Image (cartoon, rainbow, N blue to C red):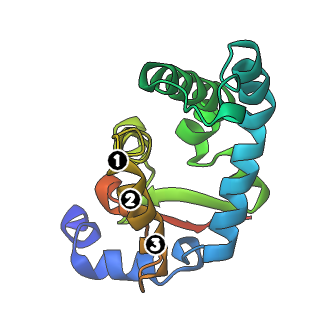
Amino acid sequence: MESIINNSDESNMDLENTDESRLASRWNRLWASLIDALTIIPITIPLMYFTGGFDGISEGIEPSLSYTLIMSLIATVIFLIIHGKFLIRDGQTLGKKVLNIKVVTIAGQYADIKVLGKRYGFYWVVSQIPVIGPIINMVNILFIFSKSKRCLHDHVGGTKVIIAKN
């Protein structure tokens, strides 16, 4: 009987009204994302420099698609090395930890590796699609201005970003 009550829509509504599930502000999400980028940049910029990623830029030549994909894969691996443990354990990257926010499922539950994989996988893969990838990525980010404050990658992953308990 108790499991029926706990699984009802009413109990989920109660969860959504607690301090635990208050949505993170758009600004906190932006700052967390910038902090996360700053953790990767000190590694990826020198790597790009030493692998010739900047050689043609002064002449207006874009890096090849294969080079861009390889560097994106390396950046993803670096992201996972830096943030993976925290994401899996707490639903937080370093930036989210600093700003006291975290990723949870739409129901306010722990986001497991499968959920996080969908969320971040969409974000990373879509941006690599030639021509339309950057457009889709912009739409992804602009979804933050919806009432739900959820980006497209949150919808795909079934997640939301909330204020974490102190």
Residue at 36%, 63% in the rendered image: 152
Between marks 1 and 3, how big is the CA–CA gap? 18 Å
Q: Which residue is mark 3?
A: 142
Q: Nearer the viewer, residue 137 or 34?
A: 137
Residue at 42%, 47% in the rendered image: 123
Please tell me whether residue 17 is drawn above or below residue 153 in the rendered image: below
Q: Would residue 117 appear left or right of 145 to someone viewing this image?
A: left
Q: State how many labels appear.
A: 3
Q: Which residue is mark 1?
A: 131
Question: The disc labelled 1 sits on which kind of residue?
Answer: Val
Q: Which residue is mark 2?
A: 135
**Is residue 164 among the parts visible in the rendering?**
no
Residue at 55%, 78% in the rendered image: 22
Residue at 32%, 62% in the rendered image: 155
Label 3 packing within 10 angstroms: few (<14), some (14-19), many (20+): some
SS at mark 3 in the image: helix
Question: The disc labelled 2 sits on which kind of residue?
Answer: Ile
SS at mark 2 in the image: helix
- Which mark lies nearer to you, 1 or 3? 1
Q: Would residue 90 appear left or right of 40 to someone viewing this image?
A: left
Q: Earlier in the sequence, mark 3 or mark 2?
A: 2
Please tell me whether residue 139 is drawn above or below residue 104 in the rendered image: below
Please tell me whether residue 142 is drawn above or below residue 100 in the rendered image: below
Q: Which mark is residue 154?
A: none
Asked which quadrant contains residue 139, the reply is: bottom left
Q: Nearer the viewer, residue 72 or 100?
A: 72
